[in-house]
Image (spheres, rainbow, N blue to C red):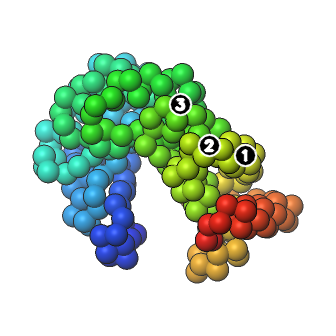
C-alpha cells in the first residue's frame, strides 16, 4: 500500500496523511478508514462528498458523519478534503462547528477558491486544532497572510519546493512575485491532469511511474501538452535558482 510505504520512508520526519475514503455505505467506509489508520499515517482524511448525496442537505451529512465517527476508533486523528469529484461539497459553518466540538479533526483541505469564504472559515476555526490548508494557488498567498496553515494542492506534484518557500516566506517582499508566477503555472492543472503530472514525474523527475490513470486516457496527452510540461519544468528550475531552493 502506498500510504504504508510513505510512512516507512518518512521515518517520522514529516507527518503523513492519507484518505482512501471512497465507498457509499458507512460500513464500507468504516473498513476503509480503519485499514488506512493501521498503516501508521498521522491522520485519515474524510472526503466531504462521501457523507451525503448531492441533493441531500447538511442535516443528512451531519447525521452520517456522526454515525461514521461512532463506528471508528476515537484515537484515529481525522481531517477533511472538499474533493470536487464526483461533486464538490463545501463544509457549512454549522457542520464545521459540530466537528470542532468532537475534538477529532485536525486538517481541512479547502477547495472553495474564494478568499472571502476562506476568511470566514478561518474565523470559525480560530483557536481550534483544526487547521485549514488551501488547495488553490491563486488565493494561497492571501490566505496565508490571514491565517491559513499551508498549501495542499495538485501543483505540489510539479514543484513542491516553490510552495514550501512561499508558505515559509509569505511575509517576504518577493512572495507576491512568486505567487503570481505560481498562479499562472497552476493553469497546467486544466491541461490534462493527472496524466500530465505522471508524465512530469516520469520524464522530468526520472521516477519509475507510468502515465496510466483511472480518470483520463493517457493517449490524450498530446505532443503539444508534453512540450508545455517540459517548459513548465524549465521555468520551475529558473524560479528555484532565483529563490535559492533545491529541486
Q: Residue at x 66, y 44 (%)?
A: 173
Near mark 2 (Cα within 10 A), the count class, few <14, some 14-19 or many ≥20, is: many
Residue projecting furthest to the front: 173
Q: CA distance from mark 1 to mark 3?
A: 23 Å
Please give left or right for residue 36 compared with residue 155 in the image.
left
Residue at the spot of label 3: 112
Of circles 1 and 3, the one toward us is 1
Indicate the position of residue 151 as horizontal and vertical percent values. Answer: 51, 47
**Residue on which disc 2 sits:** 137
Regarding mark 2 in the picture, which secondary structure is present there?
loop
Q: Is 143 on the left or on the right of 75, as rendered?
A: right
Quadrant location, the C terminus: bottom right
Q: Disc 2 to disc 1, how far (Cα)?
A: 13 Å
Image height check: is 210 above or below 185?
Answer: below
Q: Residue at x 27, y 34 (%)?
A: 128
Q: Position of residue 139 (x, y in %)?
A: 60, 35
Labels 2, 1: front one: 1
Residue 116 is drawn in which quadrant? top right
- Using the image, tell me which numbered label, if any, was put on residue 177: 1
Tell me how far mark 3 sits from mark 2, CA to CA. Answer: 12 Å
Residues 137 and 246: in front is 246
Which label sits in the foreground, 3 or 2? 2
Q: Position of residue 69 (x, y in %)?
A: 18, 39
Amino acid at each position: 500500500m502506498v500510504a504504508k510505504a510513505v510512512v516507512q520512508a518518512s521515518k517520522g520526519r514529516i507527518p503523513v496523511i492519507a484518505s482512501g475514503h471512497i465507498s457509499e455505505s458507512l460500513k464500507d467506509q468504516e473498513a476503509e478508514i480503519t485499514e488506512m489508520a493501521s498503516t501508521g499515517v498521522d491522520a485519515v482524511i474524510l472526503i466531504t462528498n462521501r457523507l451525503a448525496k448531492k441533493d441531500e442537505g447538511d442535516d443528512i451529512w451531519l447525521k452520517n458523519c456522526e454515525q461514521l465517527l461512532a463506528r471508528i476508533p476515537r484515537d484515529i486523528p481525522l481531517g477533511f478534503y472538499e474533493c470536487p469529484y464526483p461533486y464538490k461539497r463545501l463544509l457549512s459553518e454549522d457542520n464545521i462547528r459540530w466537528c470542532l466540538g468532537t475534538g477529532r479533526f485536525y486538517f481541512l483541505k479547502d477547495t472553495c477558491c474564494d478568499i472571502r469564504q476562506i476568511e470566514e472559515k478561518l474565523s470559525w476555526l480560530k483557536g481550534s486544532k483544526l487547521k485549514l490548508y488551501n488547495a488553490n494557488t491563486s488565493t494561497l498567498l492571501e490566505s496565508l497572510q490571514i491565517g491559513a496553515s499551508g498549501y495542499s494542492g495538485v501543483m505540489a506534484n510539479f514543484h513542491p519546493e516553490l510552495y514550501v518557500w512561499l508558505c515559509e516566506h509569505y511575509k517576504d517582499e518577493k512572495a507576491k512575485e512568486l505567487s503570481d508566477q505560481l498562479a499562472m503555472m497552476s493553469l497546467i492543472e486544466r491541461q490534462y491532469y493527472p496524466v500530465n503530472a505522471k508524465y512530469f514525474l516520469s520524464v522530468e523527475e526520472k521516477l519509475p511511474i507510468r502515465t496510466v490513470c483511472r480518470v483520463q486516457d493517457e493517449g490524450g496527452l498530446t505532443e503539444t501538452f508534453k512540450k508545455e510540461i517540459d517548459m513548465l519544468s524549465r521555468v520551475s528550475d529558473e524560479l528555484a535558482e532565483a529563490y535559492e531552493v533545491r529541486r
